[in-house]
Image (spheres, grey):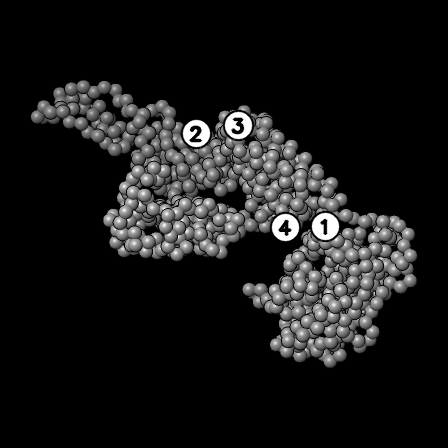
Amino acid sequence: MTGPDGGNHWLIKKTVEDCQKDYKKLFRFRNQPEIVALSKCRLPVSLKNDLDSRVLDSISQKLNESQITCTELWPSGETDSTQLNIELLTSSAERQDLLDLALRCIHVIKEDLSILHHVKIIFISFRTIDRLHCGWVQGSKDSILSFISEGRSSENFEKLLFIYYSGDIVIAAQKLADLAEHSSSLNKDYEVKEVLIEAVKQLEVLVKRAASDSDPIIDLTLKYSFQHALLDCMLILLKVVSVTKDQDVAEKFIHLFSMFRRPDEVDTTKDYAKLFYDISNLIEVLKLRYVIIPNTRKVSLGAEINPLPRIAIVQPRIWFDKEYNEYKLTKEGLEKHIEIFKENIEKASLQSANVIVFPEMFFPASQISDLRDISKDKNIIIITGLDYEYDEFNNPINSCAILLPNGNLIRQQKLYRSKYDSPNMICGKELFVFTETPIGNFSVFICFDYLSPRDLIKFRGVIDTLFVITLNPDVRAYNECAKADAYRSLYGFIIIVNAFDPYSTTRLKGKSGFYGPLRMNRSIAEFEEKKYGIMIEDLPLNELNRAKRGEESSTMKSLPANFEVIDLARDYPEKEIGEIQDRILQEIKENKRNAAKEPKTDYENLLKGNRSQDLERDIKKHGYAIMVLEPVHTGAATRLSAFLLINKGISKKEIKSIIITATEDIRKRECYSNEIQEARHKGKLADVVWLYIFNERRHRRHLVASDFYDYYVCRTQWISPKLDKHFSPMPLIANDKIEDIQIQWNKNYSD
């Protein structure tokens, strides 16, 4: 255009729509002399693809306000037929969840889509938070908007779209990650093996997809996920090794680690198949090697078996009404019971007893840690009931303690409430089998638990001795059961330990005793009526084991029908596997559901919030400003690294004062890169703090060459004295220190 003064004037509008309006206005007046020439409008594609346009900004804002995370938004294609590309972040890779997210997205931005006349195609892709691609949908904009305006059922939405779904890869990889994370809390043979079995199922999904799909996006996703899947399998194997101490599993871990060190040589089809094959073979080995007893944990002492072990049981004389208050020991009861305990421990030790057993609720739970040293010093296994403890919601816990001479303390909760227990008592979930002890394999029941046939039968052929600790006015029923069970159900020794109380309203008659599958009399020894104190018996364990092997025994009855000696490293009962697997997967699902309810941390904003927003102000106020704070946590240690800016020209003495203040400040900071770090380190003071101090603002990559720059002052390292040395970092090569902080000064820096 030329103006009246003959000059040229250019009008630049912000949006495509404004330019189009101006063009139409000019076209109507194209014959006027002021318009020298007007060519056909050909708006450049770059103008159409302007990410800062008003409509695209509106779309981004609306998605953000609707809590839909849009990571990319851009138009592409020809001038008159543009495709609008939207990339959304998804927390679920399930196919239906992706479709629901796409439909929700369209509903939110439908008004903006209707005024983007040049857009003909809508393309929505989905990625997970760790950038794994899980699929995309594509459809005609007009068809989609028509569908929305007519309010048709959401079930018909997918019929309008071309759908490409690869979420099965993401889901399998995520399940592996969940299993690996969950395995850290497992401590039972059957649990870690079930996690391993479930891991193989997810690997099988990945193997099949790697072999069948040659799509380049899928291949990239598989390559990205392989290292994670391999690492997750290694974490699970580590847990299996820690529980089973199995040599083959340990060797397999080393083999997988060698694969992990070759990230650039990944062939997804071949390597996923190999990983699947390795773990599958390992499971078959473990199936043949270990018996699984549901809800039972194995604990090994690693001691030689005494062929004639000596067992001491204590039947104390108590006054329940005076010594207990709602099943918790009173001060009088506590003092009396500790005195009884000490007296009988000495007697048992003098007579070389291998184990001493006290009744249910006998010992004060508050004093239990004192028994570790006694068990070690006397080289004796101690089994005792503990008085009631209470959880944070004031619910009572009835438990017993088993102390082993190696310093191990095992707490076992009562599984079932009896009519005498508090109705709010928290029920336990597991039993223990103690192996490689001087008295062979043994287990403990707390009172009413003994009357559970389902739990008793678990130990048939597994244990040699069962201790039943009780506080029971009707122990006669237990005595009668023990005589039968010692032969028919268990084929081993059953020892009942009760208290004697002639004073209280509910009298305890004692009647503690030893029972076993002997030929002549299954009652080996019993306390007489109204007697109390200590009773010590030698159990013919060698004869019991001879009989279990099918050898002739002069003292033991022949084996009952269908009796089989079960080694805890022999069978794998498939029947219970489904129930165990369902329970473990349900726990994982529940944990994830609970985690989803909690507000998510914005880790990027958390990192920004730990930096100084105004460097000069912070230096003036504190003497230093934080340019960068980085979380460098490990699984066992909370570690933070900070890059600080200070003023130039200050003395080393002043800098040391800043170092002390800044180290303490950084220790208290909350800083994480991801959810796993947050879960492990939230609320903890840092165990390790590194400071990198500068007196001029520079990028941290120059640190490598820091000695050649005047702005680098020093670096420091502080390690908590409480941190286990196994988890400490390499010490700093320091040339100075202050308190517990090591300092490495720049050799070019001087006061």
For the residues carrying marks 1 and 4, which lies nearer the camera in this image? 4
Q: Nearer the viewer, residue 62 or 563?
A: 563
Q: Which mark is residue 187?
A: 4
Disc 4, SS: loop
Disc 1/disc 4 C-alpha distance (Å): 13 Å
Calculate the distance from the C-alpha at mark 2 to the C-alpha at mark 1: 58 Å
Res. 158 visible in picture: no
For marks 3 and 4, the one nearer the N-term is 4
The label number, if any, that marks residue 265 in the structure image: 3
Q: Position of residue 428 (x, y in %)?
A: 66, 59
**What is the distance, in whole Å, between disc 3 and disc 1 at their CAs?**
42 Å
Instruction: Give the structural element (helix, strand or loop) at label 3.
Output: helix
Q: As drawn, is 35 to the left or to the right of 90?
A: left
Label 1 sits on residue:
293
Q: Amino acid at mark 3?
A: Glu
Three-letter code for the amino acid on which mark 2 is drawn: Ser
Q: Residues within 10 Å of mark 4 (few under 14, many from 20)?
A: some
Residue 140 badge: 2
Coordinates of residue 567 in the picture (x, y in percent): 77, 48
Question: Which residue: 43% across, 39% down?
Answer: 105
For marks 2 and 4, give the one nearer the viewer: 4
Mark 3 or 1: the one toward you: 3
Determine contact: label 1, label 4, CB under 8 Å: no
From the top left corner, tell me how far across and down residue 431 is, in percent. Answer: 70, 56
Earlier along the polypeptide chain: callout 1 or callout 4? 4
**Amino acid type of the residue tagged 1 in the rendering:** Ile
Q: Earlier in the sequence, mark 2 or mark 1?
A: 2
Of the two numbered discs 2 and 1 in the rendering, the one whose residue sits closer to the viewer:
1
